[in-house]
Image (cartoon, grey):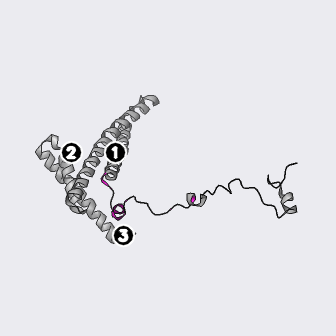
């Protein structure tokens, strides 16, 4: 008959023989299981210079601004398309026609506006990262000049007057965003 202590037995067996211990198949493997689950809470960096930097890298900036621009534009465009489709509905339309109109209009407008804002985010991130690399500082001048350059480059195909107006609008918008961020830091405690 097999030894009941090896296989664990039941509660009655453990009370009758308190000196016996349960078999642990992993006891001799010397696996550092505690280090697997005691993970550090602070970020780990490969190089010391990365831990000093207080901003995202150019690749992270590119991904962030492009993604945020596309997502925002797609949601806004889909909302605009929904509004247009609901306004264009005719009294004799069936439910299938109305749903089709909503889907087509939302998809078309969401795609169009999302792509435009995604390209604006891409241009802005590239210009801002280029300015930071060129000037070796990260301040508001980089942001405003990147906004100015983004607007001008985005509308450059429409002529110099349109590019100048779009550049001024881009610079003013980014300047307002930077000023608003500074005001929030100053007056709103975190």
Secondary structure beneath dot 1 equals helix
Q: Please say whether residue 38 is one of the residues in the magenta stretch.
A: yes
| Secondary structure character of the magenta stretch overall | loop
Q: Which mark is residue 188?
A: 3
- Give the residue displayed 43% in from the left and 33% down from the top: 99
Q: Quadrant of the C terminus?
A: bottom left
Judged left or right of residue 6, residue 90 is left
x, y percentage for residue 169? 20, 53
Q: Earlier in the sequence, mark 2 or mark 1?
A: 1
The residue segment tinted magenta is 37-58
x, y percentage for residue 173? 24, 56
Q: Residues within 10 Å of mark 1 (few under 14, many from 20)?
A: many
Q: Nearer the viewer, mark 3 or mark 1?
A: 1
Residue wearing tag 1: 70
Secondary structure beneath dot 3 equals loop
Q: Which mark is residue 49?
A: none
Secondary structure beneath dot 2 equals helix
Residue wearing tag 2: 154
Judged left or right of residue 10, residue 54 is left
**For the residues marked 3 and 1, what is the alpha-carbon distance in whole angstroms?**
29 Å
> Pointer 3 and pointer 2: residues touching (CB < 8 Å)?
no
């Amino acid at each position: 008959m097999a030894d009941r202590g090896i296989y664990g037995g039941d509660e009655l067996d453990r009370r009758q023989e308190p000196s016996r211990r349960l078999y642990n198949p992993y006891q001799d493997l010397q696996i550092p299981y505690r280090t697997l689950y005691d993970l550090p809470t602070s970020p780990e960096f490969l190089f010391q210079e990365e831990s000093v930097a207080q901003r995202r890298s150019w690749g992270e900036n590119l991904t962030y601004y492009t993604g945020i621009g596309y997502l925002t534009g797609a949601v806004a465009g889909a909302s605009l398309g929904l509004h247009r489709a609901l306004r264009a509905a005719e009294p004799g339309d069936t439910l299938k026609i109305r749903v089709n109109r909503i889907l087509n209009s939302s998809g078309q407008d969401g795609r169009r506006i999302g792509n435009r804002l995604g390209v604006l985010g891409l241009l802005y991130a590239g210009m801002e990262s280029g300015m930071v690399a060129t000037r070796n500082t990260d301040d508001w001048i980089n942001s405003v000049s990147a906004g100015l350059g983004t607007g001008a480059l985005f509308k450059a195909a429409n002529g110099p007057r349109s590019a100048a107006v779009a550049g001024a609008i881009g610079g003013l918008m980014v300047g307002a965003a930077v000023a608003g961020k500074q005001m929030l830091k100053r007056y709103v405690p975190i």
